[in-house]
Amino acid sequence: MANHNARGLERITKAFGFSMSGFRECFRHEEAFRQEVYVLLALVPLGAWLGRTGVERALLVGSLLVVPIVELLNSAVEANVDRVGLEKHELSRRAKDVASAAVFLSIVLAGLVWLLVLLPRWPA
């Protein structure tokens, strides 16, 4: 897939194309990624609006962006494991579970950031 002979702008253009292909493939084949994209489309504008400062907006929006980033990596791990073989194997299960745990932690991170930024605004 990669073109090792490409240089300069051609390399950047090809890399961009590979990245867009990765987004399309993940969106097409991974329900969790689609769900996270839909949530992102709703919450990114809300986070940008709720943030009072640039730092707050960056935290609210950035914490959301971490979730699909980790999901893309999780999907890559799963695709590689499945390519090697579909038979049950402890290491395959472990790799998939660890990648899934990373997605879970990214969601927890996003939730904690939103709570820590927005909770102090509500009167006691």
Image (spheres, grey):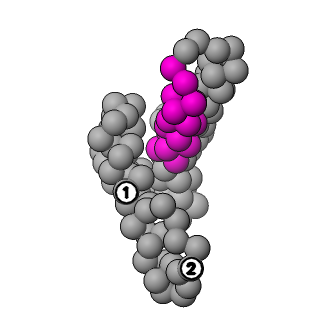
The x and y percentages for residue 10 are: 46, 83
The residue sitting at the bottom extreme is 8
- SS assignment at label 2: loop
Foreground label between 1 and 2: 2
Chain part drawn in magenta: 68-86
Most foreground residue, 111 or 23: 23
Q: Is residue 70 left or right of residue 33?
A: right
Amino acid type assigned to the residue bearing label 1 in the image: Ser
Query: Relative to 53, does residue 30 appear above or below in the rendering?
Result: above
Does the magenta run of residues contain 37?
no
Tag 1 residue: 21
Residue at left offset 54%, top offset 87%: 8
Query: Mark 2 or mark 1, which is nearer the start of the sequence?
Result: 2
Mark-to-mark CA distance, 1 and 2: 20 Å
Q: Which residue is mark 2?
A: 5
| CA neighbours of label 1 inside 10 A, class few (<14), some (14 to 19), many (20+) | few
Q: Is residue 99 visible?
A: yes
Q: Quadrant of residue 30?
A: top left
Instruction: Verify CB contact (< 8 Å) between mark 1 and mark 2.
Output: no
Give the image location of residue 66, x and y in percent.
Answer: 54, 47
Residue 118 visible from this viewpoint: no
